[in-house]
């Protein structure tokens, strides 16, 4: 692909710059160089992986052309088909990495909120399942994840959870997940075997840069309280949980996931910054007379973007009118094919 030679040259230049002892006194430049180095390494490694596959393809073609051993030819033909599929996948991934470089303004961090909607305890358990699904998918993508706040129920479900995801293409791959997700299944507590329908709402919000939102300390009211939930007796011994109210807007955010009060305050401030930016964007759109498509709505069953039907082992995305089977694997994080269909359709 065009540009790979320049990328390899740039990579070598950056390695030389990082070895400069004077860089220690300029940590901002050093941090930028490290980020660039890590990004270029992904491209170079992906290209190497692709070239290895291409070499294997040529080797198998040679075996097939020779035709000396029928059994060996049969194995080569089977492997050749698999290698070509892998080649197509790697070429696509490499193009995406190169495209990301052409769009440096693409968000590198997002905040995801999942809240229980209709369905009581079953809805809370569904929130837990969605969180696990996204967490496992994030691991396969090499994204960093950090839980900022969560609220649990007595039976182990989550009333709501807010977490941050950061990494390559995180926004472009997750932005279509915002909306109401509906689940149809038989709850473990249902003795009669009746199928229940529950919902959970997902919001995907771009994490803004620090300069985009200015918050005055006088505009904040901070309350400390004892955390509740998992963690044994320790969580109730000290007031580590933090609640911050932004007085001009009335926005209230909380965090109690960390045992450290300072860390919880940082988490709460991260949530507040995103909420304020979202509010700012909504007000700007209203001023120019536009209409903002709501991601969440009121989390009612009719306002759904996707249905997870466990009895029929089927997940249906209503925006692209397409169904996928293998629900168990999808809930374990294998949502890549579904996300790719959404990206191609632009839904």
Image (tube, rainbow, N blue to C red):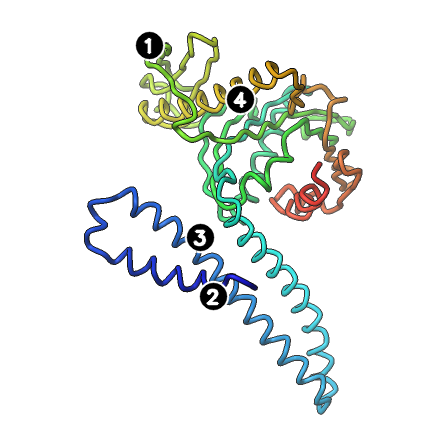
Q: Quadrant of residue 193?
A: top right
In-image side of 102 versus 214 (left or right)? right
Q: Residue at the location (56% across, 15% down)?
A: 283
Tell me the residue that label 4 is attached to: 278
Q: Secondary structure at mark 2?
A: helix
Q: Determine which quarter of the picture holds residue 54.
A: bottom right
How packed mark 4 is, by other alpha carbons closer than 10 Å (few <14, some 14-19, many 20 or more), is some
The mark nearer the N terminus, 4 or 1, is 1
Which residue occupies the foreground of this view, 182 or 188? 182
In the picture of the structure, the residue carrying the numbered disc 3 is: 39
In the foreground, 112 or 5:
5
Q: Earlier in the sequence, mark 4 or mark 3?
A: 3
Q: Is residue 228 left or right of residue 15?
A: right
Name the residue tied to disc 2: 5
- Packing grade of label 2 (10 A; few <14, some 14-19, many >=20) is few
Toward the viewer: 65 or 315? 65
Residue of label 1? 218
Mark closer to the observer (2, 3)? 2
Q: Give the x, y percent position of residue 300.
A: 71, 19
Tell me the CA gap for discs 1 and 2. Answer: 53 Å
């Amino acid at each position: 692909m065009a540009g790979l030679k320049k990328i390899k040259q740039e990579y070598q230049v950056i390695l030389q710059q990082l070895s400069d002892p004077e860089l220690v006194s300029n940590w901002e430049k050093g941090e930028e160089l490290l980020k660039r180095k890590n990004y270029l390494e992904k491209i170079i490694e992906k290209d190497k992986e692709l070239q290895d596959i291409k070499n294997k393809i040529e080797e198998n073609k040679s075996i097939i052309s020779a035709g000396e051993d029928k059994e060996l030819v049969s194995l080569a033909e089977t492997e050749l088909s698999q290698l070509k599929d892998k080649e197509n996948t790697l070429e696509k991934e490499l193009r995406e990495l190169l495209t990301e470089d052409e769009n440096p303004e693409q968000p590198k961090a997002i905040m995801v909120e999942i809240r229980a909607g209709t369905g009581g305890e079953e809805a809370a358990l569904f929130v837990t399942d969605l969180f696990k699904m996204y967490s496992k998918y994030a691991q396969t993508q090499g994204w960093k994840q950090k839980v900022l706040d969560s609220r649990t129920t007595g039976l182990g479900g989550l009333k709501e959870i807010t977490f941050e995801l950061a990494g390559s293409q995180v926004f472009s791959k997750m932005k279509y997940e915002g909306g109401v997700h509906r689940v149809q299944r038989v709850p473990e507590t249902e003795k009669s075997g009746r199928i229940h329908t529950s919902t959970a709402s997902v919001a995907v919000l771009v994490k803004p840069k620090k300069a985009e939102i200015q918050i005055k300390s006088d505009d904040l009211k901070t309350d400390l309280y004892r955390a509740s939930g998992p963690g044994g007796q320790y969580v109730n011994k000290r007031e580590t949980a933090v609640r911050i109210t932004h007085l001009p807007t009335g926005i209230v955010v909380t965090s109690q996931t960390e045992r450290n009060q300072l860390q919880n305050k940082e988490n709460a401030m991260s949530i507040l910054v995103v909420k304020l930016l979202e509010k700012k964007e909504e007000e700007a759109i209203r001023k120019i007379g536009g209409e903002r498509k709501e991601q969440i709505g009121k989390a009612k069953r009719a306002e759904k973007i996707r249905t997870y039907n466990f009895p029929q082992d089927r997940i249906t995305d209503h925006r692209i009118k397409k169904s996928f089977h293998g629900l168990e694997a999808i809930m374990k994080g294998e949502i890549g094919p579904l996300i790719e269909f959404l990206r191609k359709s632009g839904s």
